[in-house]
Amino acid sequence: MNKRLLGVIDATTVHEDLHELALHRSAAAIPFGGRYRLIDFILSNMVNSGIQSVAIFPEFQYRSLMDHLGSGKNWDLNRKRDGLFFFPTSNPDKPYPGIGTLDHFADNIDFFERSTQDFAVIANSYTVFNMDFQPLLDWHIKSGCDITEVHKNGATLGIYLVKKTLLMDLITTRNETGYSNMRDVVTDIDSQFKLCYYDFEGYAVMVDTIAKYFNVSMDLLKPEVWKELFPKERPILTKVKDEPPTRYETEASVRNTMVANGGLIEGTVENSIIARGVKIGKGTVIRNCIIMQKTQIKENCILESVIVDKDARIEAGTVITAPAESPAVIRKGTVQGMRTGS
Amino acid sequence: MLLAGGKGSRLHSLTKNLAKPAVPFGGKYRIIDFPLSNCTNSGIYTVGVLTQYQPLVLNSYIGIGSAWDLDRKDGGVTVLPPYAETSEVKWYSGTASAIYQNLNYLYQYDPEYVLILSGDHIYKMNYELMLNYHIEKEADATISVIQVPWEETNRFGIMNTDSDLRITEFEEKPEDAKNNLASMGIYIFKWSVLREYLIRDEQNPDSSHDFGKDIIPLLIKEDKMLFAYPFKGYWKDVGTVQSLWEANMDLLDRDCELNLFDQSWRIYSVNPNQPPQYICPEGEVTESLVNEGCKIEGAVSRTVVFQGVTVKKGAVVKETVIMPDAVIGHNCHIEKAIVSPGVYVPDGTIIRPGDDSNEITLVSEETIGELQSN
């Protein structure tokens, strides 16, 4: 199979606008779509494209990311040869210059030297999409490009394809060239390289604000988006849990909603994403919400346009509503018991 | 030692291509997940699974046992199929002969005690408590028993005991039972005793090489210390279409003793990694269990829905078990049925029991044409 591509995921990104969801985790580890974390999309895309060696460069709060990825077994990356590599930064105080930080790669240049693949895909960790990198590689070679940046509707998706030897040159010469990341390389108007742009036609959104997070989540409820992101032949893989099927009680009324396993639903749910192991009590009405793993919502609550992070507890009778343009966020592990509104 | 070679012929086409322990159950499991998870949860990490009938699905499902955390450096799960010797191929002719053929596997570990299980039942049980009981009673063999309704005693192997629960007599499917303690097909043996009796049984040309029919009666006859271990809780033999359906329906009962949501005694299974279930704007789901990868556009009530199932618009499904990847077409009406894995039920199909019948319909590739024309 294809051994030509090396996967490099830059999971160092921190977005101020995602702050509420990224207090305890990097953007890569933000739960998404009921059972995934954002990094599952790029990682599964790499694996589904035949990539067998993936390096992850995390920074800041990487405990939840480590816990999620483990040995890479769920992505079939627990290999004797190649597999999943994890390179936490050796210098956490350095400012973050952008996707594909060459300094960070330089600390681990050995990895690039040792790997046998000819090309590398360098990508961010927080784009929701389902893409095969093989056609990209074929196109890159056929077009004689040095560096290809993947675009969506003319804007960068923060994904780069480059020959490994050239990548290593970029890393070693970074002090002379002044390039600090991959974006610098492709935006240099005096570049000596042949720079190319590859337009990805499918659904793709970089999730870097709460509003985008909310909208992309709601897009999952559109059958055409759902079909495109989760085709059977190119599954998005994630850490599996041994949750039982979700249980719907007599009073349950669920419409236009995605529900993961292990849930217990007794209330009304509409236009929402319900993650693994969520409990929704009797008489509760949930509309346009994203409820993350193991959150408990007791009886007779009303939640509208709310993102409830993991392990939260909403006491009986609580009302939380927000306008759809700026959804409220309930932080991980908190208890909400008071009536609020806006 | 988990006996998983059973054919389960009363499950008809459900076991056409797979052994009974591999039959899907409870929205995401296979029957064998229950004994295997019980082993892991009881701290038993060396498990031999004896296969014979249609082993392909079962073998690939078990794999190296990682789903049950049984991929171990020492022990772990080992699939034990029948094999050929220099003189002949020795099929497992009975439960006892199956273990006898694998004495070498047991010699390899030389355990103190051997637990013998069957892959046919749905239950949660801590085998460690049974072992403690076995040790405390200084028993040669301990048989787990459960109280069954008196009118059903003629369907089970019944243990007659003295007041100390020592087994004095074993009656297979008695017409006039003296007791209602039924064998659950779960045995703990002292390894030395098991070894001796298996070897003797094998040499007896008149034996049918079965634990219930031959080994246990001989142990009683020779006055060995046999004790009944009374188990309380949910236990069900899912050997017929009716009982498989009932056991699935039991899960929808909120007070069901078999709690799949108990985190301290999880039932593990091979997870297919599918996206969450999608309940469409027209969909309606009540009193049901639904697994990942499903798309529900119709109305589903009191139903167990396995992974990858589609229920199309206008379809009404009640008191039914829909196995993996089946599709229920538009405007179907299905009641009291088991829909086999991967079956496509064409639009407008109506399946319901007759007026004075409570019979469960098994919908399979073979029967779907017939069911439609009715």
Image (cartoon, coloured by chain):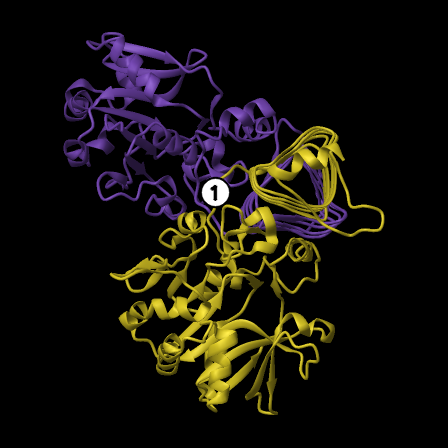
Does residue B94 appear to the left or right of B229 in the view shown? left
Quadrant location, the C terminus of chain B: top right
Quadrant location, the N terminus of chain B: bottom left
Question: What residue does disc 1 label?
Answer: B272
User: What residue appears at the point 61 percent right and 92 percent down from the top-left corner?
Assistant: B163
Observer-nearest of B274 and B202: B202
User: What residue appears at the point 36 percent right and 17 percent down from the top-left corner?
Assistant: A150
Q: Color of chain B here?
A: yellow
- Residue A337 horizontal/vertical position (percent): 68, 51
- Residue A149 horizontal/vertical position (percent): 33, 16
Q: Name the residue at the front extreme.
A: B205
Q: Is A270 located above or below residue B113 in the figure?
A: above
Observer-nearest of B261 and A217: B261
User: What residue appears at the point 23 percent right and 41 percent down from the top-left corner?
Assistant: A90
- Residue B107: quarter of image: bottom left
Does residue B60 appear to the left or right of A298 in the view shown? left
Q: Chain of mark 1?
A: B
Q: Which chain is purple?
A: A
Does residue A258 appear to the left or right of B283 in the view shown? left
- Residue A314 horizontal/vertical position (percent): 65, 50
Q: Residues within 10 Å of mark 1 (few under 14, many from 20)?
A: few
Observer-nearest of B59 and B249: B59
Q: Name the residue at the right extreme.
A: B355
Observer-nearest of A102 and B239: B239
Three-letter amino acid code of the residue under disc 1: Pro
**Number of numbered discs on residues:** 1
Residue B158 visible somewhere in the drawing: yes
Q: Secondary structure at mark 1?
A: loop
- Residue A42 horizontal/vertical position (percent): 39, 30
